[in-house]
Image: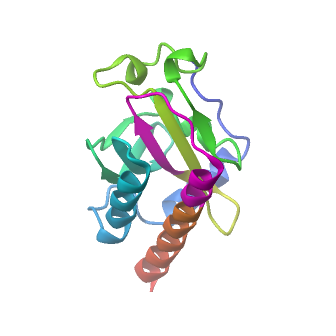
Amino acid sequence: MQAAPIPANEAARLQALRELLILDTPPEERFDRICRFAAEEFEVAQVLVNLVDAERQWSKACAGAPVPELPRALSFCAHAILGDELMEVEDARQDPRFHDNPLALAEPPVRFYAGAPLRLANGAVVGTLCLADPQPRRLDVYERGILRALRDLVVEELQRRSDEASA
């Protein structure tokens, strides 16, 4: 298992995450609704809005089996936040980064993963909107577009929520 490298802008990224005032807050329908829609649209076991903190991945919303938080070292999303593009893992057991990850070996396993980075207006990537499923698969071009559009909705809701919290 390969833990994700720490981004070069980690201090600024974590500051932007904390300024959202969202970590450890209760569930909110605005995020849950997006996850439920995506779970139905993509027919996957889990859809999550995950935020990558210094030592953990924390889930703001989830459709499917809840995963409130897990160590960052196990996080697929910690890898996804390193880039700007959607990160897709067709079969985690065949990917050298994840083949022996406890999540890929669990029952049910995470075999398929797709994570769309949540990039704020200031450029900080604070987490992902991600899909996970026990069956290997590949998104087509149309599905990738839908996931990006849903990711943009999550980012808009994060910003709206932050504006409301600081008002």
Q: Quadrant of residue 40?
A: bottom left
Is residue 103 rendered magenta in the image? no
Taking the spot 47% from the left edge, 50% from the top edge, the residue there is 51
Q: Quadrant of the C terminus?
A: bottom left
Whole-percent x, y for residue 92 in the image: 51, 23
Numbered circles on residues, count: 0
Whole-percent x, y for residue 104 in the image: 42, 21
| Residue 85 in sight | yes
Taking the spot 39% from the left edge, 48% from the top edge, the residue there is 47
Against 53, residue 108 (above or below) is above
Taking the spot 29% from the left edge, 69% from the top edge, the residue there is 29
Q: Which residues are magenta?
A: 128-148
Taking the spot 69% from the left edge, 66% from the top edge, the residue there is 122
Against 95, residue 46 (above or below) is below
Is residue 147 rendered magenta in the image? yes
Against 49, residue 100 (above or below) is above
Whole-percent x, y for residue 106 in the image: 32, 20
- Viewer-nearest residue: 167 or 78: 78
